[in-house]
Amino acid sequence: MPQKRLKDLLPTPEKILESRTLKLFAPQLADARLWHFNRHSLNKAVYIGVLSAFFPLPGQMLLALLGSLIFRANVPMALGLTWITNPVTSLPIFYAGYYIGAKIIDVPMISLRLIGRMIADFSLWALSDGANPFITYKGTVSLTAFCLGLTILAVVSSLICGLAFKAIWRYKTVVSWQKRQQDASDQSPYDKP
């Protein structure tokens, strides 16, 4: 079954609850349905985790956790998928988001270097006392294009990943069932002459 492999890859409830922020949700996280490794819970977690990953917030994991609590999805899977956007992948993802938004609302495209500087400034502003990037880049960057592009990218990616997860799970289950049927028929005492 695919769930055995997923259990090895995802963090344990104890590891998740070590976070100071997530300890605030400890009573809600006591629900056993949030930790089950079944097809429905994991599939909802894929949709929630991928969708949350594309929001340029420091609170992506908090957004995924809230989505998991509301829709009763698997918490470790949703939290783990928020790391799709990480320090290595965030620049190309945000560039693609801005590109999509800029093409849709017909605004000029900005350079990759400016998007990188914008991400760094936004992180400094959100996590400490840096300059407000919404004021700094007001004339050069279209916040509408950025948000629209990232939203479209998030929804499309979430749908593709959710449907792919469902198809892979179904395929693995069918293959496992066929293998068990084959093994059972090979060992049947009635098949011997």
Image (cartoon, rainbow, N blue to C red):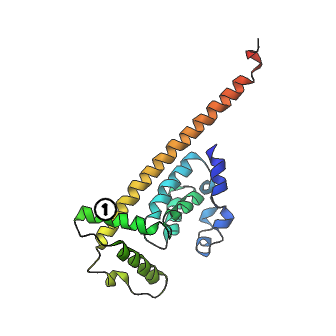
Counting from the top left corner in percent of width and height, residue 180 is at: 67, 31
Q: Residue furthest left?
A: 106
Q: Which residue is mark 1?
A: 100
70 vs 112: above or below: above
Type of the residue with mark 1: Ile
Quadrant (top left, top right, bottom left, bottom right) of the C terminus = top right
Judged from this view, the residue extending furthest toward the top is 193
Is 50 left or right of 177, judged from the image as shown?
A: left
The front one of 112 and 1 is 112
Question: Quick check: 78 above or below 86?
Answer: above
Q: Residue at x 42, y 51 (%)?
A: 159
Which quarter shows the N terminus? Answer: top right
Residue 74 percent coordinates (x, y): 57, 56
Residue 136 falls in image quadrant: bottom left
Residue 135 rendering spot, x and y as whole percentages: 32, 84
On screen, residue 114 versus residue 71, left or right, reads: left
Q: How many marks?
A: 1
The vertical placement of 130 against 21, above or below, is below
Write the residue at 52% across / 50% down.
43
Q: At 67% from the left edge and 27% from the top edge, which residue is drawn?
A: 182
Q: Counting other residues with Cα less than 10 Å from the Cα at mark 1, is it few (<14), some (14-19), or many (20 or more)?
A: many
Give the structural element (helix, strand or loop) at label 1: helix
Residue 153: give x, y in percent of width and height: 38, 59
Quarter of the rendering containing residue 98: bottom left
Residue at the location (54% across, 55% down)? 73
Question: Could you tell whether 111 is left or right of 182 in the image?
Answer: left
The answer to which image quadrant residue 139 occupies is bottom left
